Image: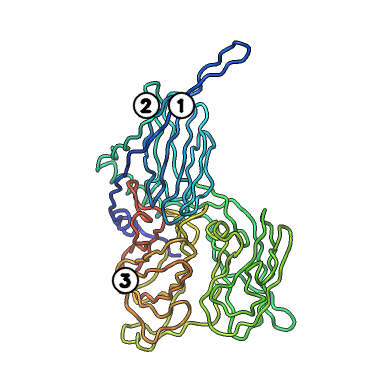
Amino acid sequence: MTAMNNDERSVLAVGGFGLGVVALAFAGFAISRSGDSGSNGSVTAAVTTTAVDVNLTEFAMTPNMLDVPPGDVTIHVTNSGNIPHNFSIAERNLTTRDLQPGEAQTITLKNATEGEIAFQCNIPGHAASGMKGMIHVSAAGSATTTPAPPTTMSYQEMDKAMTERALRFVNEPKSTFGGSALEPKILADGTKEFDLTTSIVDWEVEPGKIVKAWTYNGMVPGPSIRVEVGDKVKIVLKNELPESTDIHFHGIRVPNAMDGVDPFTQDPVEPGKSFIYEFTALEPAVGMYHSHHDAQTQIPNGLAGAFIIGDMPLPVSLADKGITKIDQTVNMMLNDAGTIGLTLNGKSFPATEPYSANVGDTMLVNYFNEGLTAHPMHMHQPVGWIIAKDGVPLKEPMAEDTILVAPGERYTVVYHFTDPGVWAWHCHILTHAEGPQGMFGMVTAIIVK
């Protein structure tokens, strides 16, 4: 990648798009109960238990301010949103599981003493989008819920925070990226063998934030696999996870026995075991490979990768737009849940990978959505020409500057760069891309020279 000069850093520093976050709060209820018990005439101190309800949505925790008396606090957490959320009190190491939409769980905060106790959703990017709050414990507490106050940042403080965060994207060194090409072993009969090992590793999802990622070959997304039509393919899966898994080839034509959906087409691949998938690449494809076992956990935590068969033809009709060849190809995996959270290719801004191009270049982008909600992807300035959906070429390319990619979908888009500058590239659900502290989550940029 070409290093950025001072002008490019200046453009990026002032190029943040604004977003106001308004905290929502509704009145909840709390029930206090106390009692005493005796044994042999002795009396113990009364135990006070306060019960409260907390509701989770995108991206709010309602109520986000709880006033309770000292004692035990029973918290009934319900996910009323459309994607997984959790409720976590870090200082007490107390958290719910990742709750699927409609699920609920009750946890108990034991022996809360006077003071303030913070809570939040721990899925990366969700707290920054507004999913956090505070429990205020006081002797005068009446088990009531109140709205959180609005941000106390001045506009100068907000501007400073946004600029500093943007400059981290420019100046800080990047950690390891996933999705690199996996080179095959060529067997005696010409078969291309790809070895994939699943394991849990420490993964830096954003600067300084390390999560437990579920990976193929130690990276998120998993390494990209590319073959040609007619190739014989062998995938050797070795499972080093603490639970069973399998591999489904999404958008790839394979025999039923190789579809990777236990228990229908195979037995689960248990921890410490291996499984071999073998098939012939019969037709061009822009596909994905991912787990189909405990998939609502394993995929958002990182078990997904790109699988490409053959080349995507460039429509002749784009020649009059100056688009006659592809100068670079980018596979972009979208996620929004699990330990990985709101990310592009397993990274949250400012840890996302920046891209560079020259005026006159054309970039082909394959968008893959392995998350749990749709993402409208928007690159500033150049129009995107959609040339294929789910690997199938369109009869005529479609011009779109914001491409809505639903879970499981793949869109192939070409961008032709005509104007120099640093251009933001992000999901246009604004709470997936920016908060009071500046840009985060599903944001990167392309530097055009």
Looking at the rendered structure, the kind of residue marked 2 is Ser
Look at mark 2 in the image and give the residue it sits on.
142
Q: Nearer the viewer, mark 2 or mark 1?
A: 1
Q: Position of residue 88 (x, y in %)?
A: 49, 41
Looking at the rendered structure, the kind of residue marked 3 is Asp
What is the quadrant of the C terminus in the image?
bottom left
What is the CA distance from the residue labelled 2 to the residue labelled 1? Answer: 12 Å
> Dot 1: what SS?
strand
Looking at the image, is 352 positioned above or below residue 284? above
Residue 135 image-quadrant placement: top left
Q: Position of residue 184 (x, y in %)?
A: 65, 74
> Dot 2: what SS?
loop
What is the CA distance from the residue labelled 1 to the residue labelled 3? Answer: 57 Å
Looking at the image, is 113 positioned above or below residue 158? above
Lower sequence index among marks 3 and 2: 2
Find out whether the residues at labels 3 and 2 contact each other: C-beta distance under 8 Å.
no
Residue 304 image-quadrant placement: bottom right
Looking at the rendered structure, the kind of residue marked 1 is Arg
What is the quadrant of the N terminus in the image?
bottom left
Looking at the image, is 132 positioned above or below residue 448? above
- Specify whether 138 is left or right of 180: left
Q: Nearer the viewer, mark 1 or mark 3?
A: 1
> Dot 3: what SS?
loop
Q: Position of residue 338 (x, y in %)?
A: 51, 54
User: Is 338 in front, or is 35?
Assistant: 35
Q: Residue at x 66, y 62 (%)?
A: 197
Look at mark 1 in the image and give the residue it sits on.
33
Residue 226 image-quadrant placement: bottom right
Q: Nearer the viewer, mark 3 or mark 2?
A: 2
| The label number, if any, that marks residue 401 in the structure image | 3
Lower sequence index among marks 2 and 1: 1
Q: Residue furthest top?
A: 41
